[in-house]
Image: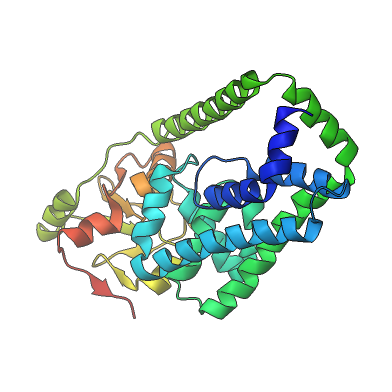
Amino acid sequence: MSDLLQLLLNHGYMLILGAAFAEQMGLPIPAATVLVGMGALSRSGEFDLKLVVATAAVACLAADLIWYSLGRFHGRYVLQVICRISLEPDYCVRRTEDAFERLGLWALLPAKFIPGFNAAAIPLAGMVKTPLLRFFIFDAAGVMLWTCAYTLLGYVFSHQVEQVIAYLSTFGVWLLILIALLVAAYIVYKLDQRRKFLKGLTVARVTPEELKSKMDANEDILILDMRNHLDLALDPVRIPGAFHVLPENVQFQPEDVTPNRDIVLYCTCPNEATSARVAMQLQRMGLKQAHPLRGGLEAWRNLQLPLERLE
């Protein structure tokens, strides 16, 4: 009997418990692959299919409840940390918030199938103070959808999966080396994607101190708040005089703005991803004086600069 197959037979339930929990906590662990393998072995009678699904579901729900609690008690700080350590680009939080605004908790159903989305969706549900029972119902539905999909995939194609497992087992220790190399290659690829994304947002920033100085000098400045409606509802304040505009609605032309008028944009994305992207869009339209606010709204708030409450 192959070493890999023997490993699954001896420690299958513990493997799926650990892999599912680790992946949902954010580690690059291919839990879906383990689920497929366990589903295949369930058909041959080595494991109980229902118990495999239940084990994976318990692991996922445990990890999700941890992220939900962190989001509920630590709010946006948790989302920013996740986005900074995530292998996905910095717009992951904004993308998740936009989906949450459109779909509500229904967004949790497909979340685990979308790279980068699940990592932010769970703490976001806590951040918006979703009642625990309501969160648990929707999250459990999404977890069951994910676990059943991959387990049943292995169950249906059990013969082919067992052949693959047997073939891979012939590599012995080289299989572990190959898996490690593939994971490393994936991480390098995603980091390179992130680097290119951030490089594409290279544009001069305005510091909060510089903006405040311009405001005190009564300079002609147009300040644009680029946050989405969900973010505004959670934090209903703005920099004094700012206008709220969604990125997709920015359609300024050079003749719409007074010559030499500064345009400062801010958001709450890590590395000012949204405001920097829109500022570059405006500059390509001829508005060369458009710049994002370094650090966004949080940097302004951290310096205890004035804010006004939205009506």
Residue at left offset 77%, top offset 53%: 149
The vertical placement of 96 against 241, above or below, is above
Judge from the rendering whether residue 189 lies leftward or rightward of residue 32; answer left or right. left
Residue at left offset 83%, top offset 34%: 162
Q: Quadrant of the N terminus?
A: top right
Q: How is the image coloured?
A: rainbow
Which residue is nearer to you in this view: 274 or 31? Answer: 31
Q: Is residue 250 visible?
A: no
Q: Quadrant of the C terminus?
A: bottom left
Picture quadrant where residue 298 is located: bottom left
Q: How many marks?
A: 0
The vertical placement of 245 against 237, above or below, is above
Which residue is nearer to you in this view: 187 or 167? Answer: 167
Which residue is nearer to you in this view: 79 or 64? Answer: 64
Judge from the rendering whether residue 61 lies leftward or rightward of residue 88; answer left or right. right
Picture quadrant where residue 15 is located: top right
Q: Position of residue 309 (x, y in %)?
A: 28, 76
Q: Is residue 292 visible?
A: yes
Q: Position of residue 219 (x, y in %)?
A: 16, 55
Q: Position of residue 232 (x, y in %)?
A: 40, 69
Q: Position of residue 306 (x, y in %)?
A: 17, 67
Residue at left offset 75%, top offset 49%: 150
Residue at left offset 37%, top offset 61%: 76
Judge from the rendering whether residue 126 lies leftward or rightward of residue 15; answer left or right. left
The vertical placement of 29 against 269, above or below, is above
